[in-house]
């Protein structure tokens, strides 16, 4: 064990796109667990787009971070001290902790990590919150049927890449939007997407969709918003379903952007638009984890993690999400296995 604990603190609320001024690395004592708690040596921590909302001093589905307090998020780590009968020192677990070398977790709110199914970092992606979001968002909200055309924005990210593969497992034609040729190739060559569009290389998204989704769109899984969503709404088929998971194109906007008015485009196709929060499915997380684990174990579900090494570079990993630096799930490797 280290003799001290490094921990990232939320230093100030950003205006517009955040930068390093919002983060401060502090060093202090290693915390001690109380009854029912675990001291965990963090192996990997997660950075996610939704965290941008926690930087705002505004009511939302995720509680805002408090200036001067530690940054929080999902972690995978090794138990080094247990004050619970449920876990022993040496166990690998995942739960919600802090951006730190060591964090204290409530033993009742963590889950075990089984490295025989997948590498530990996968429990922050395909076998964690992003995977469960994709599972419930597509199957419960999108309600895909064999033969449907499913379009996914942010398709090369942690959620979108899983959405597209589950859609393929359900007999759908899948089209993804991504931001580089490398991502497009990964979607089509490795994940089995039927088509992918590099949105940075096309000027007319509607025309690109005519080629990639000639039969229109039955299910749209939206992680991005903005002009891509404007274009997809013009292609919705009768009884189309739209699952609104994220709007990363707008997360750094200080004002409310004005774009094409979309509601009239829902009338003729009688389309359904529904927002989703994975926390609403908490009582069914076991179902999702079991099925996702089976698909990963059998190779039917491919996953990829973009790993940034070093706790000191956690803010850079987070800020890179808004530039599209990651393919698959973005994680930070804090400590190596010993």
Image (tube, rainbow, N blue to C red):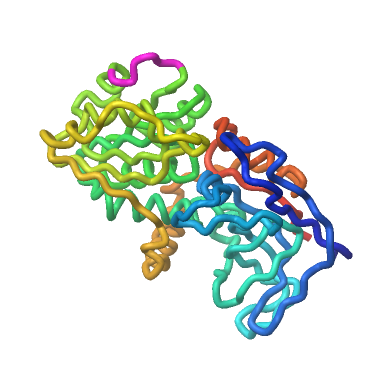
Q: Quadrant of the C terminus?
A: bottom right
**Residue 205 within the segment the image draws in magenta:** yes
**Residue 297 within the segment the image draws in magenta:** no
The spot of residue 236 in percent (x, y) is 20, 32
Q: Which residues are magenta?
A: 201-206
Please determine whether, in this image, residue 330 is positioned above or below residue 217.
below
Q: Main secondary structure of the magenta part?
A: loop
Task: Answer with left or right where residue 258 lies relative to residue 119.
Answer: left
Name the image quarter holding residue 148.
top left
The spot of residue 155 in percent (x, y) is 43, 36
The spot of residue 152 in percent (x, y) is 36, 36
Q: Quadrant of the N terminus?
A: bottom right
Please determine whether, in this image, residue 188 is positioned above or below residue 82.
above
Task: Answer with left or right where residue 197 lies relative to residue 270.
Answer: right
Whether residue 326 is visible: no
Whether residue 38 is visible: yes
For image coordinates 42% across by 22% down, the residue present is 199
For image coordinates 27% across by 51% down, the residue present is 141
The spot of residue 29 in percent (x, y) is 84, 66
For image coordinates 67% across by 36% down, the residue present is 19
Question: Which residue is at the front of the view, 148 or 332?
Answer: 332
For image coordinates 71% across by 60% down, the residue present is 42
């Amino acid at each position: 064990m280290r003799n001290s604990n490094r921990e990232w603190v939320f230093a100030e609320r950003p205006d517009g796109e955040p930068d390093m001024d919002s983060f401060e690395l502090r060093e202090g004592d290693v915390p001690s667990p109380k009854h029912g708690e675990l001291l965990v040596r963090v192996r990997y921590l997660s950075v996610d787009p939704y965290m941008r909302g926690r930087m705002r001093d505004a009511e939302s589905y995720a509680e805002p971070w408090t200036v001067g307090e530690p940054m929080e998020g999902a972690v995978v780590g090794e138990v080094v001290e247990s004050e619970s009968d449920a876990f022993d020192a040496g166990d690998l677990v995942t739960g919600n902790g802090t951006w730190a070398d060591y964090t204290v977790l409530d033993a009742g709110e963590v889950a075990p990590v089984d490295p025989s199914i997948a590498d530990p970092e996968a429990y922050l992606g395909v076998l964690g919150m992003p995977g469960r979001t994709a599972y419930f968002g597509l199957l419960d909200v999108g309600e895909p049927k064999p033969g449907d055309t499913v379009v996914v924005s942010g398709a090369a990210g942690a959620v979108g890449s899983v959405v597209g593969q589950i859609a393929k497992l359900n007999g759908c034609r899948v089209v993804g939007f991504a931001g580089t040729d490398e991502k497009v190739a990964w979607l089509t060559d490795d994940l089995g997407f039927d088509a992918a569009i590099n949105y940075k290389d096309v000027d007319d998204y509607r025309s690109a969709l005519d080629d990639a989704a000639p039969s229109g769109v039955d299910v749209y899984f939206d992680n991005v918003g903005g002009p891509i969503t404007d274009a997809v709404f013009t292609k919705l088929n009768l009884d189309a379903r739209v699952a609104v998971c994220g709007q990363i194109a707008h997360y750094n906007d200080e004002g409310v952007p004005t774009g094409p008015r979309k509601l009239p485009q829902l009338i003729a196709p009688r389309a359904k638009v529904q927002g989703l929060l994975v926390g609403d499915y908490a009582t069914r997380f076991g179902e999702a984890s079991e099925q996702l684990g089976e698909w990963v174990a059998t190779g039917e579900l491919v996953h990829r993690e973009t790993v940034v090494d070093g706790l000191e570079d956690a803010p850079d990993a987070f800020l890179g999400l808004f530039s599209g630096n990651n393919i698959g799930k973005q994680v930070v490797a804090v400590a190596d296995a010993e």
